[in-house]
Every structure is written in C-alpha cells, then in structure tokens.
Image (tube, rainbow, N blue to C red):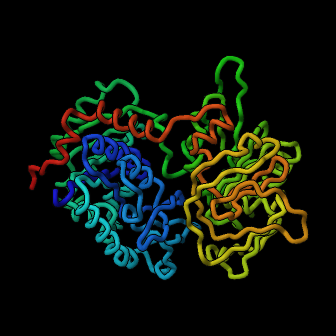
Amino acid sequence: MTRAKAVMVLGTTSGAGKSWLATALCRWYAGQGLKVAPFKAQNMSNNARVVPGPGGRMGEIGSAQYFQALAARCAPEVRQNPVLLKPEHDTGSQVVVLGEVRRDLAAVPWRERSEALWPFAREALAELMAENDVVVIEGAGSPAEINLHASDYVNMRTALAADAACLLVTDIDRGGAFAHLYGTWALLPPTEAALIRGFVLNRFRGDAALLAPGPEQLQALTGVPTVATLPMWREHGLPEEDGVFDDRASGAAAGGAGERVLRVAVVAWPRISNLDEFQPLRHQSGLRLTWARRPADLDGADWVILPGSKHTSADLAWLRAQRLDAAIAAHAARGGALLGICGGLQVLGEALTDPDGVEASRAAALGGDAPGLGLLPLVTRFERDKLVAPVSARFGALEGAWRALSGVAFEGYEIHQGRTVFHPALAPCAEVLRNPAGEVLGWQQGNVLGLYAHGLFESPAVLQALLGRPGRTLEQVCDGLADFVDRHFATGTLAGLLAPSSAH
C-alpha cells in the first residue's frame, strides 16, 4: 500500500473503552501480517512513557499509545501521540509537542492553541499513513461536543484527514447506550457521520437477546449497524487510562490454600501520575491492592506506596491536610515496608527546594519549598529542565522488607524535574540502584525505599523476586485482547473496515 488504511475508535463519552479497544485492534491487525501503527492526535493524561523523538533525543507520549505501539509490534515513538497535555491543576496543563515541553503554548487559550497544534498532529499522521499498512487511531472524549467542535482536531478533523473507517463505542453498563450512540451520530455533520461504519456496545452484562430490537431500530435511524456487543471484562490486563483504575480494592483476596494475603496501599493523592505502572499488581493472587486517601486506609497494610506526582509540593500539602503524613510515619516506625517512586521519593526526603519557582508556576497558591516527611536523608531541588530517559538498572544489596530485590535488574523510565542528593547535615543512607552510567536512582534506609525509576512492577523479574510469580506478560495481554475482539465482532467486520466505504 502507498497509503495506510485508517481505522478509528471514537467514543460517546470519556471512559467508553476507546483505549483498550484501539489496543486490541492494533494487535488484531498486526496478527494479520500487516504493518500497523497507533495514533492519537492529542492525549490528556499524566500517565506517560519515555520514547524516542526527533534527532535521537527522548520524549514523552501517553501510556495508552505506548501500549498500543507494543500491541502493534512496532517501536513506540513521539509521532504516535504528537501532542500530550499533562494536567498540573484544575485549569492548566503542561503542553508536550513531539515529546518536548512547550512552555510557550501552555498559556495560549484553548481554541487558539488547538489551531497551533493541529499542524504538528497532521504532519505526524501523514507520515505514519505513508509508512504503514494500517493506522489505528484513537479519538478523545466525544466527537459531538458541539461547543468544541470547531476547534476539535483530535476526533473528526483527524478522521477526515485519514479518511478513517470509524467505530463508535459506548459503555452500555452506564445506561442510555442507544441514546448516546444516536445522539452522537445525529450531532455530527453528514460528511463526518458518513465515516462511522459501526456501533460497538461495550461492557455488556446479561442476556444479549434482550437488546433487540434496539440495534435494529438504531440501524434503521442511522444506517449504521451494531457490529459488536462486548461483554463486561474487567480482567483484560491493560491499565485504565484515566482515574485510579475502578477505585475499588482489587487483586485476589485469597491465593492458594493457606496463602497469606499481602495488603498493598497506594496513596491516591490528587495529582497522581504514572499510576498505570501498578496495573500488574491488580491481578496477583494473594495480593490486595487498595487506594489510600485517609489514615484509616493504611490500617493493616504490609506495603505503603507513594506514587508519582505531577505536582509534588501540592500533593505533599494534601498529604498533610489529610493527616496521612503521620500515618505513613507510623507505618514506617512499625517496620512496615514503604516505597516512594519519583514524586513519592521526593516526599520521603527531608526537604523540597524550588529556587526557580518551577513548582510554584504550576499552581499560584502553592510554591515548591517545603519540608518532606524526613524518612530518607535526601534533599530535592526542582529545576526547569525535565529529565526524560529510559532506565536499565540493577539493584545492589538491599536489606529488610526489600532484600528480595538484591541483584535484580529491570527496565523502566525516568520523568521528573527534581534532582535529589543527600542532605549535607545528615548521615547518608544506602545507594541501592544505579543506571549503567553510575547515576544513583534509588536509596534505602531500613524498610524505606525511594526510587526515581518508574516501571518496577512491570518487570517479571521484580514480581518473581517479591511475590514468587511473574504475572502475565504484555504479550499475553495483547494476544488476549485480539482474541476477544475476534470472538465478539461480527464475522468479517474488522477486515471489512479496510475496504472502501459504500458512502464514498
């Protein structure tokens, strides 16, 4: 092919299931022997991964496109998500274009900014279309937000540029699915509505026969068939792109006979980032994963994890307001295992300093200078330049709760603006993780461990060392997704999306 065929997944709402369905389609088409790449013109998420960018430098894309690229069996890179918005507070986001932070665009009003960003997305899409057989495109939110339609380049402007065969997915578990599908289709201009080739009912529970005559009536109104009814499937293995998963305790509460349940509490502060790295813990037998927002949520926890943060100072202030700081200190004093990752590591230290106002610029009410929890003898200074890098590291000798990690190597990534060193007035703690260049990425004192490397629990070697079992691999997850859509889409639908529409 001289130009790829584009298949696009649109949604009636955020959270309808676009990301995981696009991932499944990437693997399904790759399984047909086609050269496949994912694309999302603009993503808004604090879940990001480090990938190659122009000129050999490293950049960031949304985690969803990273996983989609791996599902497509292609190398993740910045063109697959040319624009990434990383929310820093309720009314502002960091703007990342082709992997690089663009401070000049962060203050530009929404509609004007969209027009400035679209050329970057359009060019990236055109290049991917020229290099592949199939490009699987993910939309954002809903394509029928009529107040935003004129400046929305992520949905139908992208669909028209790619002449994409579009699927419109809705979450039937929420109720109102047929109204969502019809209303979305009806609000689109005819040239855009004509691109929708099939409706998808996602997260269905119950007897599918009870759906009749809904799909038939919907097709009579729109001319669009319902091509798949996908059963509720919580255990597909991909992280949710938005929110703290399903915000419920997860994991197998009971493992094998007589097996003790390991209770893991992740602090869910407001500006949590990179929470997708905890997905592999959700389905581990004998492990119960919960989200902590109150001191009582830490009761009985074996491990407490402080995750990444898009605004460390603000989340530290929230931690203190919730009195979680005292509960975390008490957990550590009892000998409980405590892990801080990236922003969580910074919080565990003695102090945060922000001489250039990097953190303060993110939210006017909160500066960056603050005392930390004092559980590691470290000081973090925020710098204007963000460090974005892949990580290949091996643990040295650890003690106590984390000693099983001694000598274990894993692949991960760094994304942070803080630089951390020992506090000059305190006795140093153990440096337990270094990258091949010898730079320190991890420190331990007692049962308290702080790391700058994300991706720890995505390593089968780490899971084997800590839990005695490696968990599902990403390859197994992606193959399972492809098998699922193959079973539940109407026969011939997915191949048929690559054929020209009769509407053309």
Task: In the rendered view, tell whether residue 200 sits above or below residue 49.
Answer: above
Where is the C terminus found, in terms of image quarters?
Answer: bottom left
Where is the N terminus found, in terms of image quarters?
Answer: bottom left
- Which residue is located at x 25 percent, y 47 percent? 34
- Which residue is located at x 30 percent, y 45 percent? 30
Task: In the rendered view, tell whether residue 41 sits above or below residue 244.
Answer: below
Measured as percent of width and height from the top left, residue 458 is found at 57, 45
Horizontal arrangement in the rendering, residue 498 relative to residue 404 (left or right): left
Residue 186 shows up from this direction: no
* Picture mark count: 0
Horizontal arrangement in the rendering, residue 3 relative to residue 91 (left or right): left
Measured as percent of width and height from the top left, residue 223 is found at 15, 45
Task: In the rendered view, tell whether residue 55 sits above or below residue 243.
Answer: below
User: Which residue, as the protein is rendered here, is positioned at the far top?
Assistant: 257
- Which residue is located at x 44 percent, y 50 percent? 67
Horizontal arrangement in the rendering, residue 163 relative to residue 138 (left or right): left
Measured as percent of width and height from the top left, residue 155 is found at 31, 61
Measured as percent of width and height from the top left, residue 383 is found at 66, 76
Which is nearer the eye, 118 or 124?
124
- Which residue is located at x 74 percent, y 48 percent? 294
Residue 200 shows up from this direction: yes
